Amino acid sequence: MLGLFQIFALPVLAIMVVSYLLGSISFSIIFTKMFSKEDIRTMGSGNAGTTNVLRSVGKRAAILTFVFDIIKCVISVLLTKYVLEYICAASSTPSYLVNYGLYLSGFCCSIGHMYPVFFKFKGGKGVVTVATMAALADWRVFLAIIGVFIVVFAIGRMVSLGSVAAAAAYPVATFFVTFFADYYYSGTVSLKYVLIVTAMTALMGGIVIFKHRSNLVRIMNGTEKKMFGSKKNG
């Protein structure tokens, strides 16, 4: 165990730092300043995220924010994948450690997005980065949670409500997919793996929900803005 720790300690630490720094590049702030010369955190809901950029700045800035937020998480996760695959191959260590690294890098990138060191630790709510990490880590789970988002959004017409529902569904979908498809039926992973990745996704989903706490208050009060609704709600 000590040898395994020595092999992975520095690379994993480097991955965490790099992923956090990539996540800290807040494109909502950057593109809002490019298009409007304002700080998105002083506009609309005050959130440095795609939805607020769309409402406060416009479609072009929102699309660019969305795309580049995806790209920074893709770079973070793929860089982790290649580095850890090389280490696992060179040291003959279990390949499942790569999957743990993918979740870890996605988590650190999302934390950077939420609390960016370059922008006084005031960023977005991590929905796009967590969703990107979910898609790269396990496309089956991603399809499940994006399905939840679409259904809830279609009913409530609130991005925040769909995001919270998807975040809550993330660890549930992770457990059922990995337990039944990978552990029970195919036996390609251990029960320990199932529990660890479920815990990781529960942490990520929980943080996304925590970042939406003000939205949840507005939803309960009936004052949360609807994407295609009338202005009486916002």
Image (cartoon, rainbow, N blue to C red):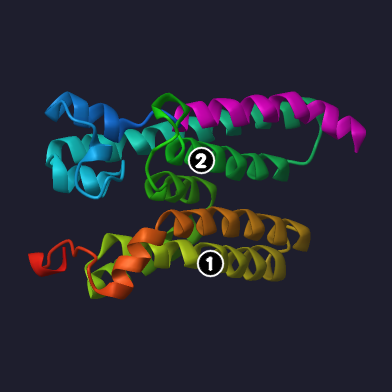
Residue 232 pos. (x, y %): 10, 69
In magenta stretch: residue 84? no
Query: Could you tell me what secondary structure mostly forms the magenta stretch?
Result: helix
Quarter of the image holding residue 64?
top left
Q: Characterize the local packing of mark 1: few (<14), some (14-19) or many (20 or more) Cα atoms within 10 angstroms.
A: many
Residue 197 pos. (x, y %): 65, 55
Which label was assigned to residue 197? Answer: none
- Does 39 sit left or right of 137 as displayed? left
Circle 2: residue type: Ile
**Where, quadrant-wise, is the N terminus in this rendering?**
top right
Q: For mark 2, give the secondary structure.
A: helix
In magenta stretch: residue 18? yes
Q: Residue at x 55, y 25 (%)?
A: 18
**Above-or-below relation of 201 to 221:** above
**Above-or-below relation of 142 to 57:** below
Q: For mark 1, give the secondary structure.
A: helix
Residue situated in front as seen by the camera: 193 or 114? 114
Give the magenta part as a residue range.
1-23
Q: Which residue is mark 1?
A: 173
Which label was assigned to residue 111? Answer: 2
